[in-house]
Image (cartoon, rainbow, N blue to C red):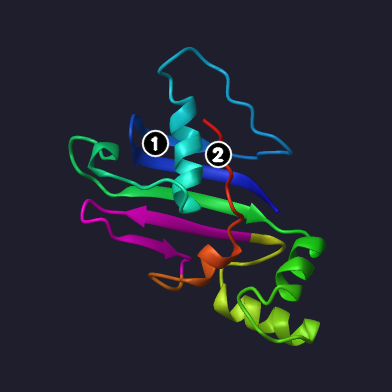
Amino acid sequence: MKISDIQIQNFKSIHNMHIPDIENALILVGQNNTGKTTVLDAVRAVGGEYQIGPEDFGETGTKIRIRVSLSLTEEDLEQLRSRGVVSQYRKKETWMQDFCQKLPSYSDGVLTFTMTANRDGRIRYQDGVNKNNPHIREVFPRIYHVD
């Protein structure tokens, strides 16, 4: 499973940044204070490993939006199925049908969703159909951060 596309809006110093077509690695290079750590914090926020606070919002207080596309291989799907993630069905076809029903933005091996956060601390994972889909958090991989 890998992040293949990310768009960050209104998060810390980033007004609007889109990083498309991410291959096997995302290498961030730049001078100090150019937003490299902010990109990583955005990914960590989506995974729940970074707590968004009042200091992360711009002066206007506009909602933070982080849109992510996750590419999932057949092996990824098999691991999710074997661990009972999203659906408890054991039969592969039934599990996949339930997975696609609960994650309606999943198509052609890609799951796309938007995490939004407002100043009140409310975080939602929208998939284009549901305003807050709890199954997205189940699928998103755990992020490990060493500082």
Residue hosting label 2: 145
Residue hosting label 1: 16
The structure residue drawn at horizontal position 71% and vertical position 82%, both measured from the top left corner, is: 95
Q: Residues within 10 Å of mark 1 (few under 14, many from 20)?
A: few
The answer to which image quadrant residue 70 occupies is bottom right
Disc marking residue 91: none
Identify the amino acid type marked 2. His
Q: Which image quarter holds the N terminus?
A: bottom right
Residue 8: x and y in percent read 43, 41
The structure residue drawn at horizontal position 43% and vertical position 73%, both measured from the top left corner, is: 130
Q: Residues within 10 Å of mark 2 (few under 14, many from 20)?
A: few
- Give above or below for 94 relative to 129: below
Majority secondary structure of the magenta segment? strand
Residue 11: x and y in percent read 35, 39
Residue 22: x and y in percent read 66, 39
Left or right of 60 in this view: 92? right
Identify the amino acid type marked 1. Asn
Left or right of 121 in this view: 109? right
The segment highlighted magenta reads: 111-128
Q: Residue furthest top?
A: 31
Q: Is residue 126 magenta?
A: yes
Residue 98: x and y in percent read 64, 83
Q: Residue furthest front?
A: 146
In space, the residues marked 2 and 1 are separated at their CA atoms by 24 Å
